[in-house]
Image: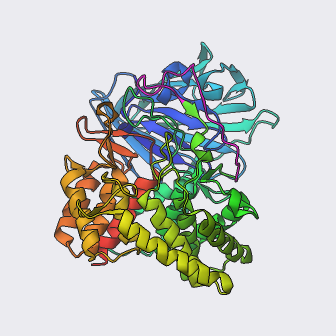
Amino acid sequence: MVLNIEDYALIGDCETAALVGKDGSIDWLCWPDFSSPACFAALVGKKENGRWLIAPREGAKKVTRRYLDHTLILETEFETASGVMLLTDFMPIRERHSDVVRIVRCRRGRISVKMELCARFDYGRTIPWTGPHERNCWAAAAGTGVVYLRTRTVLRTVDSTAIAEFALQEGEHRSFVLTHVRAEEPPPRQINVRKALAETKDFWIRWCGINTYEGSWRGEIERSLITLKALTYRPSGGIVAAATTSLPERIGVDRNWDYRYCWLRDAAFTLESLLSVGYHEEARAWQQWLLQSVGGDVSGMQIMYGMCGERHLPECELPWLPGYKGSGPVRIGNGASEQLQLDAYGEVADAITSMGRAKLSLDERLHLLQQQLTEHVSRIYHQPASGIWERRDHRDHFTYSKMMVWLALNHGIETNAGRSVRIWRQKRDRLHHQICSRGFNRNMGSFVQTFGSGILDASTLLLPIFGFLPFDDDRVRGTVEATQKSLIRNGLVYRYLPTKKNDKEAAFLACSFWLVQNLAGMGRRAEAERLFEKLLILRNDVGLLSEEYEPESSQFRGNFPQALSHIALINAGRALSAL
């Protein structure tokens, strides 16, 4: 039985990531990178679709876990009737091949351990050729990949699954290293587990040492920063929105999407969060990823790309997988990549401006890109589009999207000169007036979802955050009050009120953090801090957040861990600490 989403923890090598359950099972891992087909897909299927379990044979009375300080190295402790077992999981920062390392140690008493490695390629569909490969090595091969399991533990193969059962006395340990290579490559070299652990620990501690944030909640903010780094594809600088696909926004409803791609919006937000606390190397890498992905014609810019700038992300369903807790379909690819989302132009423009303000050396092509971006958006800003929530049923004039167009024009005016600037300024000022007149509902005293509507939308909380109006503007205050009155349920902010009875969803976590920023900006510190502390409590036991939270069941919903939720946490904490 698959665990609740909040019962998983993340390990990764900055090129892919795995989800490790409290039960000692790795139920999700795509190899060789984030968007590759999964070889462990039990998370959205069954254990027969691939998993790697290491756990006490007798079961555990108590399970606790933590990350080693300042790292992405996970420790899970199982307390049993006969002893205590410590399971250490990590992925070394990749040199050539990707490894998952698992170390089992008996801390007290005597422990009987079971290990089951069921590798299934192509999202759990393909059963590989399996068996011993050489001394202390077991292999599974199918399609484009091979995985090698190296251990001194005696293994046997049952139904294409590697199985081991062994006992440990206090102080004894066993290690297991699983390595992925492409089918045409020779077997990988054996790694030194002790050295790999020390080097992985050193990498993360050095990376955390760059962090310049000195305010309150430093530990919580550091954990979110580590999570964002883990979602960054190191070879290209691309930043994925989440490590998973098809974890549902609501159980039993088909709102299941693939988030293993690089949204310009999420990446731009991530970049600004990293820049704000001293991480410049990631910004330089993302700059090159952006230029490579968009190319020389901004009119063809998509809202998302693959990790290396791939444009073709066709969406399809995998019928052999039942979905997380039966909530199918499981989708790969994302049809939203074809949408027109006007806000993406503003988010990219703001990221470029943030890099300039941080005194980064900018590629000359970036200036040309921003100029093209401003010119292009000045021609299309009047068009209806899909909004930040990626509505697939219709386009509209979304208030937040229009505000981000205003921001793109504003940044273009700040950084360019020439005849076009006068035209951009006219359009910017006209758009500002239009947003304030048509995007603001005077009867409700609040900005609304779309021009002329009466629908509240939490995305309008971003207007003062991006400088469209000051936090003390009466219209901003009215929007906050309307949000608190109508969009809060169980103390959390929802994106919008459902228009249909069966359209109920969980609370979108980033929205509540945006409210914290608004309250902080208005000087309502005590109120903002209470909400922020409430949100921190919602994180799972190792400090991770999903996309949404369902108060009725106290469970996470949506893909996990979600970059946007962690970005919003960082920004809310920074806003509070600045007071």
Q: Classify residue 238 by image quadrant.
A: bottom right
Say which quadrant the C terminus sits in.
bottom left
Q: Position of residue 21 (x, y in %)?
A: 42, 35
Q: Which residues are magenta?
A: 309-330
Q: Position of residue 332 (x, y in %)?
A: 59, 34
Residue drawn at the location 47% of the way across and 45% of the way down: 10
Specify whether residue 211 is in view: no
Q: Is residue 111 above or below residue 6?
A: above
Name the quadrant containing residue 426.
bottom right
Nearer to me, 162 or 446: 446
Most foreground residue, 298 or 551 = 298
Look at the picture and state if 547 lies above or below 534: above
- The quarter of the rendered structure image containing the N terminus is top left
Magenta highlight on residue 178: no
Classify residue 444 by image quadrant.
Answer: bottom left
Name the dominant secondary structure of the magenta segment.
loop
Q: Nearer the viewer, residue 289 or 62?
A: 289
424 to the left or right of 220: right
